[in-house]
Amino acid sequence: MQAKDIVKIALTSTKDTMQMFLGDMTDAELTTRPVASANNIAWQLAHLTTAEKFLLDGELPGAKYPDVPAAIASLGTERTGKIDPPEGYLPKAQYLEWFGKMRAVTIAAVDQLADKDFDAPTKGSMAKYAPTLGELLILTANHTLMHGGQFTVTRRALDKPVVF
């Protein structure tokens, strides 16, 4: 197994885990806050979708990310996370479609990398957290799973069954 295979597994498994947490949730449930200060799942999905390009654009060779629709990009901001009642959110299917598109670009670009490419230094604002491309890619996968963990809190607040 090569480094790219491990990174692709991390990127794929975290996407799949996130989708598993969302499988039985309705569009309305995605806007539930488990506690008053928490961002809802719809906000987090918009954030994850825009974050993929933010984190990796210009760092990951060969990655050509599409522009995220304004309806998604405008929702994943610090300001929109605090609006009550939540407004302007999209159906779950649209978030999953766009997150899937962004993650597919990442995985396809990773598939073209050689082992030495993962040691390339990062240049952007995340370099202090992830000084190499390999570390940045793992951070990207972990970012998805971290938000997935927050989804489980909302699931518990809604009395949803434990899925993992």
Image (cartoon, rainbow, N blue to C red):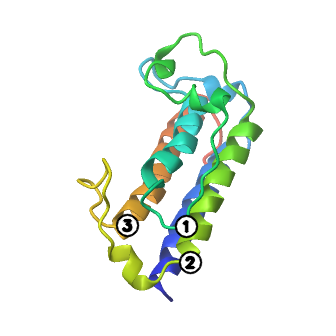
Q: Which one is closest to the eye, mark 1 or mark 2?
A: 1
Q: Earlier in the sequence, mark 3 or mark 1?
A: 1
Image quadrant where one finds the C terminus: bottom right
The residue labelled by disc 3 is: 133
For this view, does 102 lie left or right of residue 115?
right
Q: Amino acid at mark 2?
A: Gln
Q: Which one is closest to the eye, mark 3 or mark 1?
A: 1
Disc 3 to disc 1, C-alpha distance: 13 Å
136 up-or-down from 55: above or below: below
Residue 56, image x, y percentages:
46, 55
What residue appears at the point 56 percent right and 77 percent down from the top-left corner?
Answer: 112
Q: Do tag 1 and tag 2 residues touch (Cβ < 8 Å)? A: yes
Residue 52, image x, y percentages:
52, 50
Residues packed near mark 2 inside 10 Å, few (<14), some (14 to 19) or many (20 plus): few
Tell me, yes or no, if residue 17 can be seen here: yes
The quadrant where residue 28 appears: top right
SS category of the residue bearing label 2: loop
Of the pair 103 and 10, the residue shown nearer to us: 103
The residue labelled by disc 1 is: 62
SS category of the residue bearing label 1: loop
Tell me, yes or no, if residue 164 can be seen here: no
Say which mark, if any, is on residue 112.
2
